[in-house]
Amino acid sequence: MRILAIETSCDETGVAVVDDGRRIVSNIVASQLAHVDTGGIVPEVAAREHLRALDGITVQALSEAGVELRAVDAVAATVGPALVGCLLVGANYGRGLALAAGLPFIGVNHLEGHVYANWLYEGDTPTPEPEIPAVVLIVSGAHSDLVLMEGHRRFRPLGRTIDDAAGEAFDKVARLLGLGFPGGPAVERVARDGDPTAFPLPRAALAGYDFSFSGLKTAALRLVRALEAKGDVPVADVAASFQKAITEVLAEKTARAAAEHAVETVLLGGGVAANLALRAEIQKRIGHPLRVPPPRLCTDNGAMIGAAAFFVLRDRGTEVPITVRSDMKLA
Ligand code: KG4
Ligand code: ZN
């Protein structure tokens, strides 16, 4: 089963060819540069950039895979949750391709994509499939969800952020420190040279598995303003202290969920899962090797949509409705 998959939910335009939900045949991702100047994503600009980029990237993904559109078995695209304008571009483009080529179209939940990124491999040797049940932490620019994956496409929500997403907090602190956009990778980079114990920052102690990061964000803002007033902001120390605070909270709840549900598999997904400090904090707390996609498969890409689409098709066996939804939940 060979799927051509399209991802346009945020600011990366991604198109990939994926075999049997696992093998990456090609995976082209173009990050929009238009948002660097505004320091954040302007939805209309993002949608327009997707429209401009999609054709070229699709041609490139097919040619790198060495296949023609006629030779794929289905076309998939993200249909939620995300910015509706962006979703409409990718979903309508995919739907158009599918109609023209007489192929089934599969609408994919972006969050399922982040989960199924854990199933992907490159090259000819398959990696072992992750074992289910699993605890999955999805941490991106828009989401921080802790879920129990009980079976394929069967997810039980355990906790979620009650305010900001983890990636959003990284982006805001990066902006505060003048590190640019997207902020996560920049914070991680400068934090390597910083002292994570330099500044005490709050860890919100919510009951259960919910997260809250707005208090941490405000504390970081106050700290930076106070340091600015003194005339010296040790950027690396602030970044390291912030990263320590946020990754400890995410890791602690993830590990606790795995222990409580007696689950041996812990999976990560979403842009923030690319963060090596987060991986280390979680690994420290669990007794089993942590499964994490390589960083470029943690951030948005078409291959993860191709992986999830395979399991949708296997599950439902038919075409899936195309309605895009900004507030789509994990099944
Ligand atoms: O999954 P993703 O590519 O897009 C969404 O679905 O939102 O995640 C993007 C988010 C951004 O907030 C970005 O700053 C963050 O993931 N991110 C990171 C890292 N790489 C990307 N956060 C922390 N450390 C990283 N290395
Ligand atoms: Zn994402």
Image: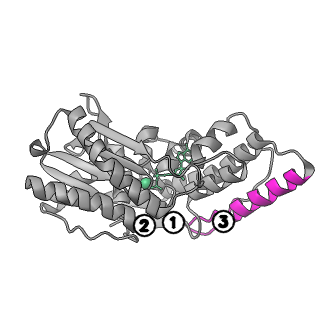
Magenta span of residues: 203-229
Return the disc, 1 or 3, that comes first in the chain's sequence: 1
Q: Name which residue lies at 52% across and 49% down.
A: 272
| Rendered position, 285 above or below 218 | above
Query: Residue tagged by mark 3?
Result: 214
Whether the residue under disc 3 has CB within 8 Å of ligand 1: no
Query: Residue tagged by mark 1?
Result: 160
> The residue tagged with tag 2: helix, strand or loop?
strand
Q: Name which residue lies at 31% across and 49% down.
A: 54
Q: Residue furthest top?
A: 124
* Distance from the alpha carbon under mark 1 to that under mark 3: 13 Å
Q: Residue furthest right?
A: 230
Decide whether residue 162 is among the magenta residues.
no
Seen from the viewer's position, the closer of residues 80 and 120 is 80
Crowd rating for badge 2 (residues with CA inside 10 Å; few <14, some 14–19, many 20+): some
| Rendered position, 259 above or below 276 | below
Q: Amino acid at mark 2?
A: Pro
Seen from the viewer's position, the closer of residues 93 and 235 is 93
